[in-house]
Image: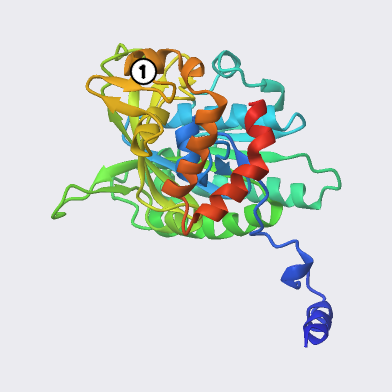
Amino acid sequence: MSDYFKSLAKAMNDENTHLLADGGNSAEFSGWIDTGSYILNALVSGSLYGGVPNNKVVALAGEQATGKTFFALGMVKNFLEQNPDAGTIYYDTEAAVTKDMMETRGIDTNRLIVSEPQTIQQLRHHGLQVLDRYIEGKEKPPMMMVLDSLGQLSTTKEMEDSTEGKETRDMTKAQVIKATFRTLGLKLAKAQVPMIITNHTYDVVGAYMPTKEMSGGSGLKYTASTILFLSKKRDKDVDKDEGNLIKVQAKKSRFTKENKIVEVRLSYTHGLDRYYGLLDLAVDYNIIKKVSTRFEMPDGSKHFGKAINNEPQKYFTDDIMERLEKAAAEEYKYGVGDDYVDDAVEELEPELLNE
């Protein structure tokens, strides 16, 4: 029977059709992009050493000043560092990107192409052109796309109406966005190119419970494999002009349990704190014990939480990180048993100890 289906797939003579066992599926997972935060990596991949998928669409949605651009830039930096030959197409709809800004954040501007589309249709046209050329190319170094942000894009109709002095709302915008991501999503999957998209959220009027929704209709919600909702929380240990705690909710996830929430610390000068959030996970899984106002380490020593967070590398030893990796898999992955966790950690162990 398998020979029949092999011959059937071959007879189709279609580049979009193949036997799954032969590989090449556009949905095939091919790796992670480090977010810059261990606990955020765990939320979206189930591993402290994972991150966002490097061949999917990821949406970062939140209110103003929740650090959406900082999150996206951190992912760009890590993607370029992980892949020395890689490049990024950055769609800047807010005219906010400068060479100095990127270089200050450690991003190689020689591998960054910036485009400033004004409309969703311009984004779609440019994106499809880039992806078609990329797919047809013989030498294809890794590539990432970033849209920052979707909420700032107009439509062609909206631009024309504004030019003519009309003030009517464009009721077609949601449909245009849906069509855009339906076509772009297929191309991105085929090209194995990840796309990071920042977007705004708004309060749902009339909801029984306070609810946030992502702007732009259903198009991005259906296309994205991961949607993270960001909300700001005051960090009493950091000046408000220097950074904040950001609550991150996995609103949609193809790899981990949905609606799980973590807190990360964002510095406006240094980016995401890599270790922040691990202490809470360690306490939840009895790796570190909370004793009154201090925390008891496995060796019996007791320390204040602020001291641990200020010098995390001193306290999060290889042994504790290994135990936290098991905890992350159990906390965030679907259907993870003890045998699975042990096998996963055993496979990763040489890499973990070299981190």
Quadrant occupied by the C terminus: top right
Q: Which residue is disc 1 drawn over?
A: 243
The image quadrant that residue 242 belongs to is top left
Give percent across and percent down for residue 186: 61, 59
Q: Is residue 131 above or below residue 147?
A: below
* Position in image of residue 203 (x %, y %): 22, 45
List x then y, in percent, for residue 236. Answer: 25, 16
Task: Check the image and report above or below for 15 versus 167.
Answer: below
Label tally: 1
Q: Amino acid at mark 1?
A: Gly
Position above or below: 259 against 62:
below
**Label 1's element?**
strand
- Above or below residue 106? Residue 338 is below
Residue drawn at the location 21% of the way across and 50% of the way down: 204
Q: Is residue 172 left or right of residue 84?
A: left
Quadrant of the image occupied by residue 238: top left
Q: Is residue 148 visible?
A: no
Answer left or right for 309 relative to 6.
Answer: left
Specify few, some or many for label 1: CA neighbours under 10 Å numbering under 14, 14-19, or 20 or more: many
In the rendering, at what x and y percent does residue 98 appear?
56, 18
- Residue at 32%, 31% in the rendered image: 64
Q: Nearer the viewer, residue 338 or 251?
A: 338
Quadrant containing the N terminus is bottom right
Q: Residue furthest right?
A: 138
